[in-house]
Amino acid sequence: MEAKQITVFGGSGFLGRHAVRALAKAGWRIKVATRHPNQGFFLRPLGQVGQIGFVKCDVTEPDQVEAALKGSQAAVYFPGLLAPRGQSFESVHAAGAGNVAEAAARQGIRHLIHISAIGANSESESHYAQTKAEGEARVRAAFPAAVIVRPSIVFGPEDQFFNKFAALARLVPALPLIGGGRTRFQPVFVGDVAAAIVAALDNPGAQGKTYELGGPAIYTFKELIEIVLRETGRSRMLVPLPFPLASIKAFFLQFAPNPLLTPDQVKLLRHDNIVAPTAHTLADLGIAPTTVEAEVPAYLWRFRAKGEYANLVPQKNT
């Protein structure tokens, strides 16, 4: 069997680490390209000895991108920001993506998968969505056969949605419902996204297509918060927070080291984050989506007041 090597940009992040594991199981030799390789060494046990290596790479530096791609037949681009900290949306979502696509084309890379997001739109009010769309455009221009993957909210053990609100519910008596909590989402399991990446690499018919990945059910923001409270066994008031007021609060929160909310995120929440009816989906890659209810309880138990077996504690008669 011919050895196959893939360069994974941003492989130590939440989605990247699950993709690295799936790629290792599929037999790929993996080169993880990251700004801080030492922070990704935890990935090594996910593969065979020597199967997962590391290279220092800043995607905004074309020479480093060129070096990271040497010897590979495929590449995946994961880097993304929820809030700019030391880097800008434009440098990571657009310029970095363009650098990788252009270098991949010059080196004759066979497969390129670019991770974008549902809601990427050059006409959006959100700078996040604008730069995601610009990144897609640069990738398509430089590497027309690239596969673009647009997930909805990605959930899994290290996610930044369910875990964030579960942690917040431990500290405050009420949780905000931005815009009344009516925004709709279609959460997709991180393992399904990783499987989709592997499937797209093995499927010649996927080249040049854009896939929107969502789970089997659509939830409002309020319904997702209710799931968090149910699985953590907590009772909290849910307080509607109109978009204008949320924008004001976000203006101040954005300056925190790890902001709970930014003005740009408020703009994103004004629009539903669900798979388009005509989009290519997980089903087109032969993947049956995993439900929120099947996975979320397995990692939110740690936020329960009495731990994983809280429901097994005998209750006193009252």
Image: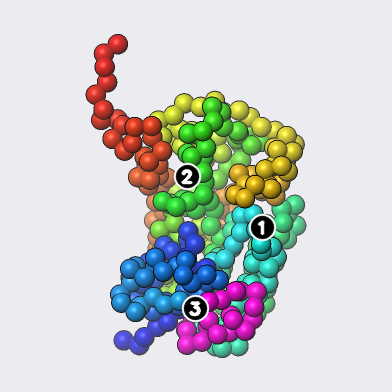
The local crowd at label 2, few if under 14, some if 14 to 19, many if 20 or more residues have their Cα within 10 Å, is: many
Lower position in the chain sequence, tag 2 or tag 3: 3
- Find residue 169 and name its label: none
Instruction: Answer above or below: position of 166 versus 295.
Output: above
Residue shown at 68% from the left, 47% from the top: 254
- Of 21 and 205, nearer the camera is 21
Could you tell me residue 99's position as x and y percent? Answer: 64, 77
Spatial CA distance of label 1 from label 2 is 20 Å
Instruction: Answer above or below: position of 55 versus 126.
Output: below
Boundaries of the magenta span? 55-75
Q: Secondary structure at mark 1?
A: loop
Lower position in the chain sequence, tag 1 or tag 3: 3
Q: Which residue does the numbered mark 3 point to in the structure image? A: 55
Residue shown at 51% from the left, 27% from the top: 236
Do the residues bearing badges 1 and 2 touch, measured as CB atoms within 8 Å?
A: no
Q: In this rendering, does residue 113 appear at all?
A: no
**Amino acid, disc 3:** Val
Location of the C terminus by quadrant is: top left
Assess whether residue 61 is covered by the magenta stretch. yes
The local crowd at label 1, few if under 14, some if 14 to 19, many if 20 or more residues have their Cα within 10 Å, is: some
The local crowd at label 3, few if under 14, some if 14 to 19, many if 20 or more residues have their Cα within 10 Å, is: many
Q: In this rendering, does residue 168 appear at all?
A: yes
**Relative to residue 307, is residue 81 drawn left or right?**
right
**Amino acid, disc 2:** Asn
Residue shown at 38% from the left, 35% from the top: 304
Q: Which residue does the numbered mark 2 point to in the structure image? A: 163
Q: Which residue does the numbered mark 1 point to in the structure image? A: 84
Could you tell me residue 237's position as x and y percent? Answer: 54, 25
Q: Secondary structure at mark 3?
A: strand
Location of the N terminus by quadrant is: bottom left
